Image: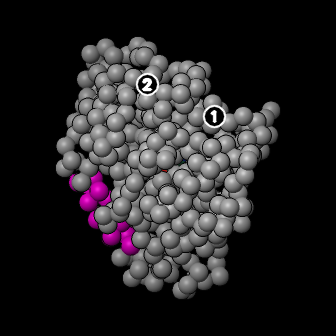
Amino acid sequence: MNPIFAQASTSIFETMSRLARQHDAVNLGQGFPDDPGPLDVREKAAEAVVKGWNQYPPMMGIPELRQAIARHYKRFHALDLDWENEIMVTSGATEALAGSLMALIEPGDEVVLFQPMYDAYLPLVKRAGGVPRFVSLKPPHWGLDEVQLQTVFNERTRVVLLNHPLNPTGSVFSRADLDLLAKYIVAHDCILICDEVWEHVLFYNAAYDPTLTLPDLRRRTLKIGSAGKIFSLTGWKVGFVCATPEILKVVAKAHQYITFTTPPNLQAAVAYGLDKPDAYFIGMRSDFQAAQDRLAAGLTALGFDVIPSKATYFLNIDLSKGRFAGMDDVTFAMRLVEEAGVASIPVSAFYAEHPVTSVVRFCFAKRFETLDEALRRISRFC
Ligand code: PMP
Ligand code: GLN
């Protein structure tokens, strides 16, 4: 058996959701909205099933969806993508990550990763034969540090795996950070795999530059997106990649042997959804922002040091100041679920080494009643 998976622990999301069920807790751990997602998009998926769209669709994804993705990025970011040669549909961002890493890494290649990092990254990089090199980001800004970049990049660096906007921190890399990273990527002739699944879930007018829009990165970037986050339909697992034809051709070979394809009705519904008017995307942001504001205000009133989030479904609290100072994130999260009945995620779970142990993540993509109930329970715990 392969030790990377044989020795892997159960994901922190699964673990905390299990504890939430066991303790009948309000689950603000694993990131999923309690809203069912836009009705018109769900209806399109149902219609497509009834119409008979139930057999294997084309391996690269249905043309309607690939064209819709190209139109979407033209509309939002003035990007020109060739839908036939630069866009492929995958079964979620997770398949896109697995396939890209398998296709682009040769055993022994070094891969730059940024901590805190999404839980799937490290096992997939290692299983593809990559040698991880870590850059550590620090709260509250989670920005890049050139000294660390200088240390990790070398002649063996082949791939950089970035999550932008970043889960779990809710931060967005600045243009200055991206320019700095681009300098190293170009100098070391690397490919950037950029997981941009949170691209639409942005707050407080956060400035977000998709990496494909940086001229130096356009031909070196493989961008990953996910309809799960664009439409709050996390269970659908419809993702996609955008990259130059040279890169995409190779990643498509991995895709053909992993999932080969993705349910056609869901693809049709996502194609419809991507053309929704700007008002949908603005409305989604303002709904989530109102939820974030409510949870942040409640936690602040209880004395927590809240790190506001510019993106994602998550905000963080920093325990290093205030009444829980000295308690580590895992102890806090365990006590919170067991004693208060509220599940959260300890951010140290997103580190492979030298973890920050004072930060705890809460998902705010919930109804106000759910957030208020969580706050009531936390107030009794404080
Ligand atoms: N990457 C990041 C950074 C995520 O936060 C998530 C899920 N929240 C994924 C990938 C997985 O996306 P999908 O469900 O489309 O596989
Ligand atoms: N991406 C979700 C989160 O960050 C969890 C996905 C999962 O459970 N693997 O909470």
Residue 159 or residue 354, whichever sits in front: 159
Sequence-first disc among 1 and 2: 2
Please name the amino acid that badge 2 sits on.
Asn
Q: Position of residue 82 (x, y in %)?
A: 37, 28
Magenta residues: mostly which secondary structure?
A: helix
- State the image quarter where residue 315 is shown: bottom left
- Three-letter amino acid code at disc 1? Leu
Task: Tell which of 327 and 145 is nearer to you.
Answer: 145
Q: Return the residue at label 2.
A: 85
Going 62% across and 50% down the picture, which residue do you hit?
A: 187
| x 32%, y 66%: residue | 204
Q: CA distance from mark 1 to mark 2?
A: 17 Å
Is 194 rendered above or below residue 173?
A: above
Q: Residue tagged by mark 1? A: 104
State the residue at coordinates (41%, 13%): 55
x, y percentage for residue 111? 68, 47
When the figure is inspected, residue 378 is found, relative to residue 119, above or below; the finding is below
The residue at the point 42 percent across, 76 percent down is: 299
Q: Is residue 341 left or right of residue 42?
A: right
Q: Where's residue 289, x and y in %?
A: 31, 63
The one of 74 and 328 positioned closer to us in this rendering: 74
Label 2's element? Answer: helix
- Residue 313 lies left or right of residue 204; in this view the side is right
Cβ of mark 2 under 8 Å from ligand 1: the answer is no
Q: Eyeballing the image, is 41 above or below 203?
A: above
Is residue 55 visible to us here?
Answer: yes
Task: Estimate how packed mark 2 is, as few (under 14), some (14 to 19) or many (20 or more) residues with alpha carbons within 10 Å.
Answer: some
Q: From the viewer's side, name the closer residue of 381 and 146.
A: 146
**SS type, badge 1:** helix
